Amino acid sequence: MEPKPPSAARTSLSHIMTAVDTNLLGTVHGGVVMKLVDDVAGAVAQRHSGGPAVTAAMDGMTFLHPVRVGDLVHAHAQVNWAGRSSMEVGVRVLAEPWDRAGVPPVRVATAYLVFVAVDADGQPRAVPPLLPETEEDHRRLREAEIRRKHRLTRRDEIMASREEPR
Ligand SMILES: CC(C)(COP(=O)(O)OP(=O)(O)OC[C@H]1O[C@@H](n2cnc3c(N)ncnc32)[C@H](O)[C@@H]1OP(=O)(O)O)[C@@H](O)C(=O)NCCC(=O)NCCS
C-alpha cells in the first residue's frame, strides 16, 4: 500500500455553540466537545484508511479552557501514527470568543484517539503506512509511539491482573 503523509487526511470541523450545548453552569458541556473531536477524528481515519474506521480508544483528552454559548469552535485533526490496522489521530480544539473580534483563538482542548479500519464484517483491515513530511510530523509520530506503548502495556497489565488468583 502506498504511504500517505498526514497532510493527505488532515481535516477540520467547526461548530457555533448554542444553548442546547450547555451544562448546568452555563458553559459548554465537555461531551459536546468530545463529540466534535470524535467526529473530526473519524473523518481523518476514514480519509487515511480509504474506508470505514471505528473508535477503539480515546485518551489524553485535556480540557484547557471553558467554551461559552456563541463561541465558534474549530477542531483540527490529523493522523499522528499508523500501524497495521490502527491509527492514532491527534485533535486540537480552538475557540473564537463570540464577543471579541480579532483576538487569537483560545486553545480549549487536545485529544488523542485510536481508530481501527474495518472491513464489511467489522474485522480489522490494513491501512496505508504514514509518511511524515515535516519536523512537526516526526515529533507527533515519536510521541504517538510512546502513547501506544503505554496504552498497550496498561491494557495487557490489567488483563493479566484479572487472571491472577486472588
Ligand atoms: C476496534 C476493534 C475493531 C478491534 O478489534 P480486535 O479484534 O481487538 O482487533 P485486534 O486485536 O486485531 O487489534 C487491531 C488493532 O487495534 C489496536 N487496538 C485494539 N484495541 C486497542 C486499544 N484499546 N488501544 C490501542 N490500540 C488498540 C491493536 O493494537 C491493533 O493495532 P495494529 O493492527 O495497528 O497493530 C474492536 O474492538 C471493535 O469493534 N470495537 C468496537 C468499536 C466501536 O464500535 N467503536 C464505536 C464506539 S460506539
Image: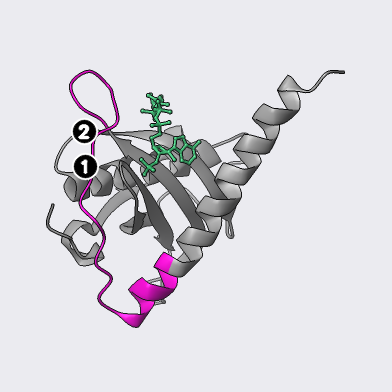
Q: Is residue 129 above or below residue 18?
A: below
Identify the residue shown where x is 16% and y is 37%: 51
Numbered label tally: 2
- Considering every residue shown, the one lying at the far bottom of the view is 135
Task: Indicate the position of residue 142 as horizontal and vertical percent values.
Answer: 46, 68
Secondary structure state at the residue bearing disc 2: loop
Number of the label disc, if any, that sits on residue 106: none
Q: Which secondary structure dominates the residues rendered in magenta?
A: loop
Residue 122: quadrant of the picture:
top left
Do the CB atoms of the residues marked 2 and 1 lie less than 8 Å apart?
A: yes
Span shown in magenta: 118-141
The residue to which callout 1 is attached is 46
Does mark 2's beta carbon lie closer than 8 Å to ligand 1? no
Q: Is residue 99 above or below residue 20?
A: below
Residue 27 left/right relative to 99 = right
| Closest to the observer, 95 or 124 | 124
Which of the two labelled residues, at mark 2 and mark 1, occupies the earlier sequence position? Answer: 1
Residue 28 in view in this figure: no
| Ligand 1 quadrant assignment | top left
| Closest to the observer, 158 or 17 | 158
Identify the residue shown where x is 16% and y is 61%: 8
The residue to which callout 2 is attached is 52
Task: Indicate the position of residue 166 as horizontal and vertical percent values.
Answer: 87, 18
Residue 104: quadrant of the picture:
bottom left
